[in-house]
Image (tube, rainbow, N blue to C red):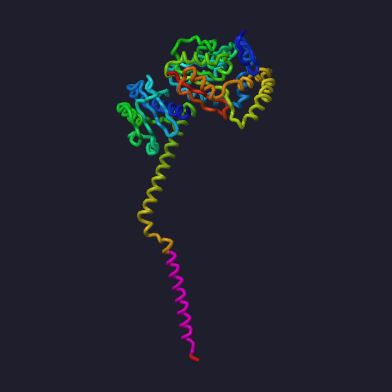
Amino acid sequence: MDKTTHFGYQEVAESEKAAKVAEVFHSVATRYDLMNDLMSAGLHRLWKRFAVAQAGLRPGMKVLDVAGGTADLTRLFLKEVGDSGTVLLTDINFSMLREGRDRMLNEGRTPPAVQCDGERLPFPDNHFDCVSVAFGLRNMTHKDQALAEMRRVLKPGGRLLVLEFSRVWKPLEPAYDLYSFKLLPLIGEVVAQDRDSYQYLAESIRMHPGQEELKAMMEAAGFVRVRYHNLTAGVVALHKGFKI
Amino acid sequence: MIAAGLIERGLNHLVQQTPGAAATLRRHTGMSVRFDLALAQVDLRIADDGCFSEAAIDTPDATIRPTPALLARLPFLGREALRDADYQGDAALLATLDRVFRQLDWDVEADLAPLVGDAAAHRLHRLGRDARDGLARALSGMGHSAGEYLVEEVELMAREIDVARFNHGVDELADAVARLEARVHRLEQPAA
């Protein structure tokens, strides 16, 4: 029998999770940015800028944006690496990737956009100076495999940035739960006409490893000097690790 | 993590703005330096392009422990950068870092220009520089006045105890005058 994994609070066969996640993102792709702004009151822009500031990028560097979706990080990375650098936008979901690619085209930029699975990256070993995954690892079926792949494509000395929802500060949990399970699906229903996808979002955040667990997973995948920084009382955490 | 990111980003920004700094550092490509701060250690490696790159290092080639005295001297503006720091490790690397750090110069105008335009950046920079110079002059003037007061004027000023002693003397004199007046008044009266 097929192994099972979680899809929000549901247990599903591992082989089904990717399709179910794809369904969610196909559904929300066109309203994704608007919903991000509404759900986080614009804070996601600051979280992403903070992540880019920790990337230590300089002109000429090569960056891989895994699960880059609507290209928020890619666009910020492009400013850092300049014309001599390369930023590859990737996502497993075509709808999300198309949104990101079109957005960059509308801004007059044409960086490469590649549809691929974060767990099987079609890039050579030791190729990128920096790999990032923002709000994407949570949706991957085999997180350990994805982290190992990201490590494989990083150059020695390169760094991985994982920006992801995490464990909120304990005293804020009741309010955060109320917001996540009551208000968030309601916003989803009103703005994106999709309550279920935002219910999944809230559930998947709860099922995702906390700060210390993710740090341990990164270390198990071979990253060293893994550190994390909580943002907005732990609603989101940025993990950074190096390949040696 | 924040300190490491800020130091890496800040240093690289200055290195890229300072002519010759990256080229000088490139001679030590691959070597590593540890900034041993009070609360954190920041390990940086000199990358191929002469910039600093945060790295995971067990044994750095050089270690620098900044001291409050060193931080108080920022920016170095041509002065010895590592004079007040504790440092150890590769002498050639440390000498290069000292030379590069003292050359680093923040081009504020260049950083403001993309945000507010060239003309406004120039004016803002000039305003900031004038304000800084004015503040420095005011502080220098205050220091000079305080020194002058302490060295010369304080000796001429009456101390509190002297004022109290003077007031006491005045009171005693007033009493004596009152007694004398009373005696003179009694002597002037015809004898009964």
> Residue B145's spot in the image, x, y percent?
39, 50
Q: Nearer the viewer, residue A216 or A63?
A: A216
Q: Is residue B146 visible?
A: yes
Farthest residue, direction left: B92
Left/right of residue A209 with respect to residue A82 in the rendered view: right
Instruction: Identify the residue at image location x=62%, y=31%.
Output: A172
Which SS type dominates the magenta stretch? helix
Left/right of residue B184 with respect to residue B104 in the rendered view: right
In the rendered structure, does residue B137 fall within the stretch colored magenta? Answer: no
> Residue B157's spot in the image, x, y percent?
40, 59
Instruction: Identify the residue at image location x=43%, y=61%.
Output: B160
> Residue A137's spot in the image, x, y percent?
55, 17
In the rendered structure, does residue B181 fall within the stretch colored magenta? Answer: yes
Q: Nearer the viewer, residue B93 or B159?
A: B93
Quarter assignment of residue A140: top right
Q: Nearer the viewer, residue A134 or A18?
A: A18
Farthest residue, direction top: A1
Q: Is residue A103 visible?
A: no
Q: Which residues are magenta?
A: B163-190
> Residue A8's spot in the image, x, y percent?
63, 18
Compared to residue A161, the image places residue A114 above or below, namely above
